[in-house]
Amino acid sequence: MTRVVAKFGGTSVGSVERIRHSAGLVADAVRRGESLAVVVSAMVGETDRILGLAGVFGAGLGDAEADVALAAGEQVSSALMALALREAGFEARSFQGWQLPVVTDGPPGASRIAGMDVSALEAAMQAGVIPVLAGFQGITSQGEIRTLGRGGTDLSAAALAAALGARCDIYTDVDGVYTTDPRIEPAARRLDAISHDEMLELAAQGAKVLQTRSVEFAKSRGVPMRVLSSFLEAGESRGTDVVETQDIAERRIVSGVAYARDQARIALLGASNRSELAARTFAILADAEIGVDMIVQAHTRTPGRVNIEFSVAHRDLARAQAALEAGLSGADISSETGLAKVSIVGAGLRQRADIARSLFAVLGEQGISVRVLATSEIKISALIDNDAVERAVRALHTAYGLERV
Amino acid sequence: MTRVVAKFGGTSVGSVERIRHSAGLVADAVRRGESLAVVVSAMVGETDRILGLAGVFGAGLGDAEADVALAAGEQVSSALMALALREAGFEARSFQGWQLPVVTDGPPGASRIAGMDVSALEAAMQAGVIPVLAGFQGITSQGEIRTLGRGGTDLSAAALAAALGARCDIYTDVDGVYTTDPRIEPAARRLDAISHDEMLELAAQGAKVLQTRSVEFAKSRGVPMRVLSSFLEAGESRGTDVVETQDIAERRIVSGVAYARDQARIALLGASNRSELAARTFAILADAEIGVDMIVQAHTRTPGRVNIEFSVAHRDLARAQAALEAGLSGADISSETGLAKVSIVGAGLRQRADIARSLFAVLGEQGISVRVLATSEIKISALIDNDAVERAVRALHTAYGLERV
């Protein structure tokens, strides 16, 4: 019997009607002969409501008591899902993180799962009871409630799937992973399968389907995932399988085009090329917990001096500049805003050195200038004007034939 | 150092402003030199909201999953109270029922506290940390979440006070126990002290200050309680002490006048006086979980036959009649609605056989007819017309000199 962990996010349990519909999808899977365990997020809006209450007392994510309050959101939705499954004619029981337990380490608000005892869930499943685990939460070895950070329920589901030897079905508000955002390119196609690596790059480059940590976890433990819509009926869409690279029959060079708006570029002009300066720059930014994305170091006409350029999220720009000005006395720091990042992702890029050149050509034909270009094993990203994002996404989608995938 | 368990109900933690004010009262108590542990209910309205969600799936109080969802309400308020205490400059930490644990037995929605391990709370208090216990909840010995029923947070507080050897301060929306409802009799006076027994009778006869189970528990364990308002500043009112009878210095014959509207009377006319019929009648009502209050059995002019009369809450009348008609074939059952119960309560009634007569006289002067009269050790109740309740309360309050208490 195929074991499946079915995870439902905030919108999929956002109301009693949505919970009932999601319970129906679980019921369909059981009737198909799958053995199910369910993982749920808090009802959409509940996490923000509770954080708002905690915020009045000056506490936010990262405070242990905020974690206690937040975990209550999943407690309610797990109980309601168990009730909905019972209404659908199945035996079901909710489990909280402490009841397994799911043991965490790391700070409040951003803990990681250190271990999980699934014996109670195994026993329930063997007795024909569908267990419904409250996601996003666990307890420390001292018995204190912790949460896993935003999107942590995906991680709970992936970890539970690994422990149960199950596939991990992520039910969300889209019916799979698309070649790009269908709101921008109507010809976008749902992919039947994608590798964990490609999924990770798409998520990192702006696609919002799956949370990066859950995919990393699934990749490291070889857990197959499937992205499905909880807003359709069972069988209306087969979703997208996220699997190991070798399990994908169909070989594509490019699998998707991702984008992220509201990027900014910081340039350190004519900096010394002594490597400790670059190291210091990025150490300063790391200390300030600012994520740095695309980095380019170019030689200038002055021998021994280089330009360092990199992109940050626009919301981090002011903090980044302040930190650099405080930490790098006398550096010539400039910045540019109104930028966006567009990326092509595909396992097939590994062998194709010409892709970067063709990307330049595609964007050039559209009159879109590339500020910074960065490549990794399976991705190429270009920093461009915010205004050009939609044209760039459509042009790249067409150029790499993604409407025929 | 005086140990105090301070319990805050739903209205006392009903908003972030109310939580902050309640935290201020705890802070004042600590500054006075008391050693505090706090117990909280869910924010007012939260329990009904969650029950409403569970109700959509056909689950109500008494369902184990409803208990799981309900307990989340106290989880949120306990964390927020801990944060508010921290904001007020104290170290504080929330504790859920399972973290002590508070061990329960009995059915979901109406469990009782079987035991409580307070070592974690003792350790917190000794380390200068104010523990905030989520009330109303515990776990079974199998680790399943259970709630104690409506008002169960008072019981949590009383049990914690017993375990810690503490006084139990119940903060509510009134500043103590009054001689009667001040909305009916403006001359009503706050009592400085009242016995557990008197408090129990007042609660049973309709006064809504304290939950009966918590007072019974406090009485059985000799826990002193104090009723205080969380809507005043510290010291504005000294509240009412609920203590053992011998600890009350001031002796009064009558301590209070209570009332309950919406009563109904059921009469079984000319029933056989064989005791098994009365026993069967009340067994039928007990099986239907209908609370029977005042019972009178009177001989009729037909030798060997009696009338049995008793009162029930109006909401239970239809069920009671149906159960009796099904269970007592051929009995002559009649009923009367539009009734109310007015009661005088006082430890001093024990020695005063003339009180019943004087109560008849007081009500008679007002032209109020008494349908049924029932006495206990420290209480006399009369079933009267609903319309006469306010006049009866005021007349009795004056007749027994309660405005001078």
Image: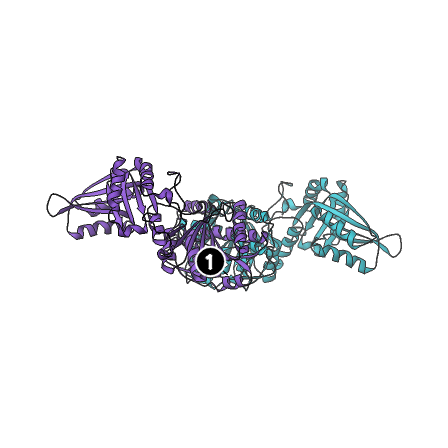
Chain colours: A purple, B cyan
Q: Position of residue B175 (x, y in %)?
A: 55, 47
Left or right of B374 on screen, residue B164: left
User: Few, some or many C-alpha atoms within 10 Å of disc 1 (few <14, some 14-19, many ≥20)?
Assistant: many
Asked whether A97 or B299 is in front, the reply is: A97
Kindly state the secondary structure of the residue where label 1 is placed.
Answer: helix
Left or right of B219 on screen, residue B373: right
Identify the subunit bearing mark 1: A
Left or right of A404 on screen, residue B403: right
Q: Position of residue A214 (x, y in %)?
A: 39, 54
Q: Quadrant of residue B398?
A: top right
Q: Position of residue A118 (x, y in %)?
A: 47, 63
Q: Is residue A318 visible?
A: no
Residue type at tag 1: Gly
Tally the marks.
1
User: In the rendered image, which residue does mark 1 sit on?
Assistant: A97
Q: Position of residue A281 (x, y in %)?
A: 21, 49
